[in-house]
Image (cartoon, rainbow, N blue to C red):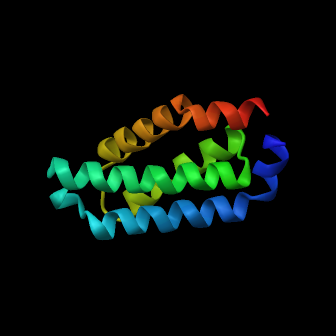
Amino acid sequence: MGFISDFLNRKKIDELAERLGKQFTQRLPFHRAGDEKRFSGEFEIALGHIQGFQRKEKLGTFGKARLINGFQWALIENGYEKTLAHKISHSIATRLTASPAAEKTDSQ
């Protein structure tokens, strides 16, 4: 169901990515990204939203990639440097694909 779900949910995926990127940068502007404690908290919040959406909509590989890439571009559009936005999105991708919930959803 992953591929079909990915195709049917493109608009939802794009809207979530943009909203999460905007929320992340509002709560933790780029100039304060060096605060490890706040950064870690905001990262976990964004990751939780992405994981919840992924489970709810049963996203496949393409949907996850679209969501993570959209989130990365939303960070860049809202003031984050490309290198930091890439590191954040790469970390989210790593955590999302390594989580037991993602493995369980993909195997069903």
In the image, 16: left or right of 30?
right
Quarter residue 13 falls in = bottom right
58 or 92, which lies in front? 58
In the image, 19: left or right of 104?
left
Is residue 49 visible from the viewing direction of this image? yes
The image position of residue 85, as x and y in percent, is: 36, 47
Q: In this view, does 74 lie above or below 82?
A: below
The image position of residue 16, as x and y in percent, is: 57, 63
Q: Which residue occupies 53% across, 47% down?
A: 68
Is residue 72 visible from the viewing direction of this image? no
Q: Which residue occupies 36% across, 62% down?
A: 24
101 or 3, which lies in front? 101
Q: Quadrant where the C terminus lies? A: top right
Q: Is residue 101 above or below residue 39?
A: above
The image position of residue 1, as x and y in percent, is: 84, 42
Tally of numbered tags: 0
The image position of residue 17, as x and y in percent, is: 54, 59
29 or 101, which lies in front? 101
In the image, 77: left or right of 18?
left
